[in-house]
Image (cartoon, rainbow, N blue to C red):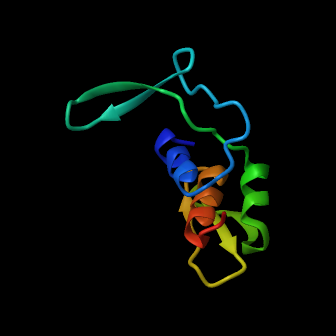
């Protein structure tokens, strides 16, 4: 999961109860900055949740995960909120969590 998506989850109220996950470089994050054409560095300050944590957080709004033929994943909701598609199952379910406004 990207740092940007993990940060959105935090801002939406996703539980931050476990120790933040270090993405790269011993607890520091590398993000590509298109404006400066370089990598930026910043402290990790949000969790990188597991797939099971994301599914649990979605509650009854989560129906299933489907791997598409193009390699992307769909997080199928129980409600009519649209089906998020992403490169990984974690990212797809994270987008479902965000789209349903879970707290």
Q: How many marks?
A: 0
Q: Is residue 88 above or below residue 79?
A: above
Q: Position of residue 78 (x, y in %)?
A: 72, 79
The structure residue drawn at horizontal position 55% and vertical position 45%, both measured from the top left corner, is 6
Q: Is residue 27 left or right of residue 90?
A: left
Residue at (56, 15) in percent of width and height: 26
x, y percentage for residue 83? 59, 73
Please give the name of the residue rendered at 60% of the width and 25% of the height, measured from the top-left corner: 22
Left or right: residue 46 compared with residue 15: left
In the image, residue 7 lies at what x, y percent?
51, 45
Give residue 95's quadrant in the image. bottom right
Is 79 rendered above or below residue 11?
Answer: below
Q: Which residue is drawn at 65% across and 50% down?
A: 90
Question: Residue 47: image x %, image y %?
Answer: 63, 38
- The quarter in which the N terminus is drawn is top right
**Farthest top residue?**
26
Left or right position of 81 against 49 = left
- Image quarter (top left, top right, bottom left or bottom right) of the C terminus: bottom right
Considering every residue shown, the one lying at the far bottom of the view is: 80
Q: Is residue 30 above or below residue 14?
A: above
- Looking at the picture, tell me which residue is in the foreground, 46 or 91: 46
In this view of the protein, which residue sits in the foreground, 45 or 33? 45
């Amino acid at each position: 999961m990207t740092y940007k998506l993990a940060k959105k989850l935090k801002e939406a109220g996703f539980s931050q109860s476990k120790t933040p996950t270090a993405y790269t470089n011993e607890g520091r994050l590398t993000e590509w900055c298109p404006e400066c054409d370089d990598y930026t560095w910043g402290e990790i300050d949000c969790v990188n949740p597991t797939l099971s944590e994301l599914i649990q957080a979605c509650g009854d709004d989560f129906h299933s995960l489907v791997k598409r033929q193009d390699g992307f994943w769909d997080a199928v909701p129980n409600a009519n909120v649209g089906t998020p598609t992403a490169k990984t199952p974690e990212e797809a379910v994270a987008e479902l969590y965000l789209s349903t406004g879970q707290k």
